[in-house]
Amino acid sequence: MEKLGIDPLLLIVQIVNFALLFIILKKVLYKPILRALKAREEKLAAIDKDAKELIQKKESFEIEREKSQKAAKLQVKRMLDEAILEAGRLKKQALEEGNKRVKDLIAKGQNEIERQRRLISQEITLEAKELSKDVINKVLSQVLDKSARTRSVTLAARELESKAKIGKKGKL
Amino acid sequence: MRTKVIVVTPLKLSGKDFDLLKKKVKSYLESVSLLGEETVFEEEVDPTILGGFKVKIGSVVLDLSLSGKIDKEIYGRN
């Protein structure tokens, strides 16, 4: 070794020196760094776990949100259907009421027309009767002479006589 | 009780005709118990009754006139 230029004592010292340095570094430097690395890994793992949980929560929240949206859409659709049905029912009811009102009005109108017709008919009949009576009275007053009037008195007296004979009461 | 009977005729009757008419009216009034103990007949002329005669006893009227018959025919009343 001496031929190669290596001093054994120096080599031993260097080895001891290296070993001491290794031991000191291991104790003073490597261990804290490894601990820090381990702690960092654990922290990263925890963050990763939290992130996974958050993602899972987000997914479940999305699912819930979709469910809620579907339910809300269904409810809105049901409400719309009910509203359409109700509107149809109300429309039908309004139409029926309107038709009934129109029928009532027509019936009232017809009744009023009939009443007016009857009144007019009665008035015309009464006027015709009055006119007939006037004409008959005028004609008879001109046609009936004294003898005819006297004869009419005699005929009425006979009528009265027959009533008396029958013993019935005359119309008084 | 005195009863006043008015006989309405379309023309003035002769005394004989009126007496005959009075007799028949009296007979009728007896038959329907409308004749009082003392009855006074009065004659009234109304040309508008046209023919026949009417007998008035208070508010009661016996209508045998031609105008009454026409009314009855036309209006269905006396």
Image (cartoon, coloured by chain):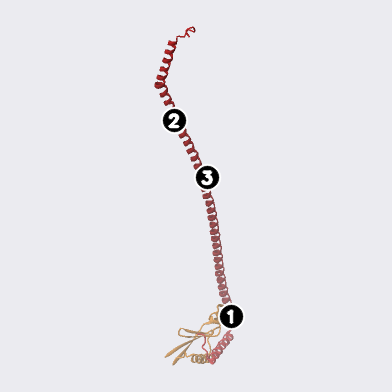
Chain colours: A red, B orange
**Local secondary structure at mark 3:** helix
What chain does badge 1 belong to? A
The residue labelled by disc 1 is A140
**Who is closer to the viewer here, A4 or B18?**
A4
Eyeballing the image, is A98 above or below A31? Answer: below
Residues at marks 3 and 2, CA–CA distance in whole angstroms: 41 Å
Q: Quadrant of the N terminus of chain B?
A: bottom left
**Local secondary structure at mark 1:** helix
Disc 1 packing (10 Å; few <14; some 14–19; many ≥20): some
Disc 3 versus disc 1: nearer the observer: 3
Residue at screen point 59% across, 85% down: A148
Disc 3 packing (10 Å; few <14; some 14–19; many ≥20): few
The residue labelled by disc 3 is A70
**Who is closer to the viewer here, A48 or B42?**
A48
**Local secondary structure at mark 2:** helix
Q: Earlier in the sequence, mark 3 or mark 2?
A: 2
